[in-house]
């Protein structure tokens, strides 16, 4: 492939964020006659849908993270910058970076900074429960889970031991369901042989969901299947139940105005995320509108009405130009399609002087995994569950991983975990593990 | 295999440390008529000879670490305890543990706590250089190495950029040589395609050795081969050179009374380890003799003269009952053989009432790797170098890894890295990476 020469008039596209949205935008602009700079705080793209497998000791961070430079190395028109955007100067078309003395000029800006764990104003809850949006959060979660099994092994007080073996997962969306399933597999099948005093099968896994059913975004039939599968694995599901307080190893639940305290060594937070704080910066600098989750309201082509040269995609975008007027969910396929769409629009507009049709999301379906060999798949008209859904889930995820970085390893690792039910990556590292 | 019943008279063997020595002792006592407790601060065994591959982004911690419980799960007479020994009470035959209210009784004690990075009294050097003995140290080293390439990419001052691309490795033993080779491969072959502004091939890798040659424990011929290979890879080797000061990103070298300051973004410490602090505890409680490196002088059967029920093995032991009266080196094969020997001695003595011959180390050879396809092998009468030595090195390490934990993944990962020269695990995580 010949690389077009970059001239002084070549438009400079700056992409903020190397997640699914930013990376797909970058790849679609690769070796095209534009100059691209991709900025990310981290030096790697993280395959977030598999973060729960790090937290539960099946995969290592290196298995699901790819160096951004490495993924983009064949696109000579793309530069990767490891830095953090602190401000936007729309009048001069510039970004202020944390570690650069001079602001960075852009002609076109694609904002794709993603989202972070959110506690809906209960900031103290963050100290006592563990979110799952970054590698570090996943490693913290892994340390907590496996440390509590170790502590339980040594605990002689039955009540304290029971608390150490109680895992409360808050939030019955895909992340909560996946964590609950993986924890059940772990305590029922992987760990019992390894411990001598404690009976890991006695571990209590409680999945708390405020709504009336888990996996609310899925058809009711699949919610029911997921519920049945989790129950078979020994997970307690508490729907219609809200969390009113989280303190050190104690979570207070409320169901039908009845309050209950649960002592749990591990409290996992899978109940919510909010858009990156850069949404706030955009709102202040450009006066654009935010929704309640901090997402930027975007136009039909994902640009800002006041600034057509600025696009917002992925978890930071509220795209409601849908048939049911509901915003698209913050999932990887939406971000990928938005990234690819914006890249094509930019090429059409700046190079071919063509207009683009508005963005349209093609929903190919939703997949959630429950344990090692079970999943639910909502493929529009086709609803699947069980092992066949798991196979589809594994196939889709491997395809994406391979497309990125030839992560064949992950496939072998999965085959291995399936065959042996062994979680080889369950290291307790970092804070408190060696002091 | 039938497991012998454990009766009240069954001797209780307590092993402190799950490194090569402790783990091989435990495995050799597995399913034998003794009760075994293995205590380690960490929940995993670490394959330390490959730590440098974590530091240079080729492998993930999970690839070279195995949960101790998992490795020992089929030996029902072995219990694993994650805890730290803080004191020894030899009169009552008890160990004091950090997280247990009551001390732990033992009949026979095997001390195998290993060693830690040592700065020979220059404790401030620890702040400005990076050791490599734990997973955390390896991840810190990985963050430093790859962060400095990122910073160099953004640096516009040529002098500062050159300093960021300068890597000083202190210590020309196997660890220093392996780090130098891996850094050279990284900067010459893996990274150049990934960066746009900085020329990674300009990275300066300086290996500093106080003695007259690197790999001093190897035959002179192989030291020379290693020197030649490293020089071809672009490594600068400074023998007969000592370090007189290490400050923030500045290391002061002294050669023939000539002093020189080198500005280096990365200063790696591979110059020394010392025995675990538990040697000091043993000396205070039992009056046993320590050598200059803090190692315990042991008898011909690795026990303590004053306490025949206490054995010391691995990096904590100074075993000098060798033909040349020199202590055995602190390497994995010595620890493994010592662990196995002590286990057999215990079984002979307590069960069969047999005496054992003194310990004898069978040196099968030494291997050090230099870059991806080069190594030196000292197989007693056979001295090999180049690719054939690398193949032997890879084969031996894979055999040990598979023996432990069926880490077939590592083999695939290596094949992959060799084919593609891609370091996929080069994530910058933890401290400073996301604040």
Image (cartoon, coloured by chain):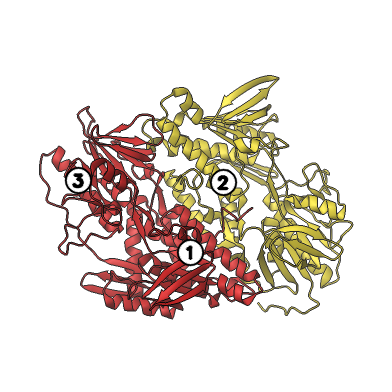
Chain colours: A red, B yellow
Can you give x and y, in whole percent of width and height, for residue B383 in the image? 65, 41
- Please give the count of numbered marks on the rendered protein: 3
The answer to whether marks 2 and 1 sit on the same chain is no
The residue to which callout 1 is attached is A56
Q: In this picture, is A97 found above or below B107?
A: above
Q: Residue furthest left?
A: A354
Frontmost of labels 1 and 3 is: 3
Frontmost of labels 2 and 1 is: 1
Q: Quadrant of the N terminus of chain B?
A: bottom right
Q: Is residue A421 visible?
A: no
The residue to which callout 3 is attached is A304
The disc at residue B138 is 2
Q: Mark 1 belongs to which subunit?
A: A
Frontmost of labels 2 and 3 is: 3
Q: Please state if B321 lies on the left or on the right of B173 as rendered.
A: right
Residue at 28% from the left image edge and 78% from the top image edge: A221
Helix or strand or loop: what does disc 3 sit on? loop
Q: Please state if A60 lies on the left or on the right of A93 as rendered.
A: right
Q: Residues within 10 Å of mark 3 (few under 14, many from 20)?
A: some
Measure how far apart labels 2 and 3 are at the Cα level: 45 Å
Q: Residues within 10 Å of mark 2 (few under 14, many from 20)?
A: many
| Mark 1 vs 3, N-terminal side | 1
Helix or strand or loop: what does disc 1 sit on? loop
């Amino acid at each position: 492939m010949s690389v077009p020469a970059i001239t002084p008039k070549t438009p400079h596209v700056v992409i903020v964020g190397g997640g699914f949205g930013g990376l797909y935008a970058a790849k679609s602009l690769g070796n095209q006659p534009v100059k691209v700079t991709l900025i990310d705080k981290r030096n790697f793209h993280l395959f977030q849908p598999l973060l729960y497998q790090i937290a539960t000791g099946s995969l290592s961070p290196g298995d699901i993270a790819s160096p951004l430079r490495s993924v983009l190395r064949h696109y000579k028109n793309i530069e990767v910058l490891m830095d953090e955007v602190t401000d936007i100067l729309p009048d001069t078309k510039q970004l202020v970076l944390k570690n650069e003395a001079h602001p960075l000029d852009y002609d076109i800006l694609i904002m794709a900074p993603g989202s972070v764990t959110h506690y809906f104003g209960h900031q103290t809850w963050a100290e006592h429960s563990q979110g799952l949006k970054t590698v570090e959060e996943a490693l913290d979660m892994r340390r907590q889970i496996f440390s509590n099994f170790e502590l339980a092994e040594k605990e002689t007080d039955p009540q304290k031991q029971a608390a150490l073996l109680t895992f409360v997962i808050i939030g019955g969306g895909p992340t909560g369901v996946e964590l609950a399933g993986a924890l059940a597999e772990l305590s029922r099948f992987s760990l019992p042989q390894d411990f001598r005093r404690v009976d890991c099968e006695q571990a209590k896994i409680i999945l708390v969901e405020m709504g009336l059913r888990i996996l609310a975004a899925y058809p009711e039939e699949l919610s029911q299947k997921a519920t049945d599968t989790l129950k078979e694995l020994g997970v307690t599901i508490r729907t219609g139940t809200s969390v009113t307080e989280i303190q050190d190893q104690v979570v207070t639940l409320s169901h039908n105005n009845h309050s209950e305290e649960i002592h749990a060594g591990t409290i996992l937070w899978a109940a919510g995320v909010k858009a990156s704080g850069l949404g706030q910066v955009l709102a202040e600098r450009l006066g654009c509108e935010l929704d309640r989750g901090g997402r930027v309201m975007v136009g039909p082509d994902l640009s800002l009405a006041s600034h057509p040269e600025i696009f917002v995609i992925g978890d930071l975008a509220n795209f409601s130009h849908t048939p049911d007027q509901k915003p698209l969910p913050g999932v990887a396929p939406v971000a990928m399609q938005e990234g690819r769409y914006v890249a094509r629009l930019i090429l059409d507009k700046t190079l071919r002087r063509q207009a683009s049709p508005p963005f349209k999301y093609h929903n190919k379906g939703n997949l959630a995994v429950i344990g090692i060999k079970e999943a639910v798949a909502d493929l529009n008209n086709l609803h699947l569950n069980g092992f066949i859904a798991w196979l589809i889930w594994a196939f889709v995820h491997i395809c994406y991983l391979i497309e990125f970085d030839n992560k064949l390893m992950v496939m072998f690792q999965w085959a291995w975990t399936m065959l042996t039910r062994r979680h080889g990556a369950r290291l307790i590292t970092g804070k408190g593990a060696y002091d």
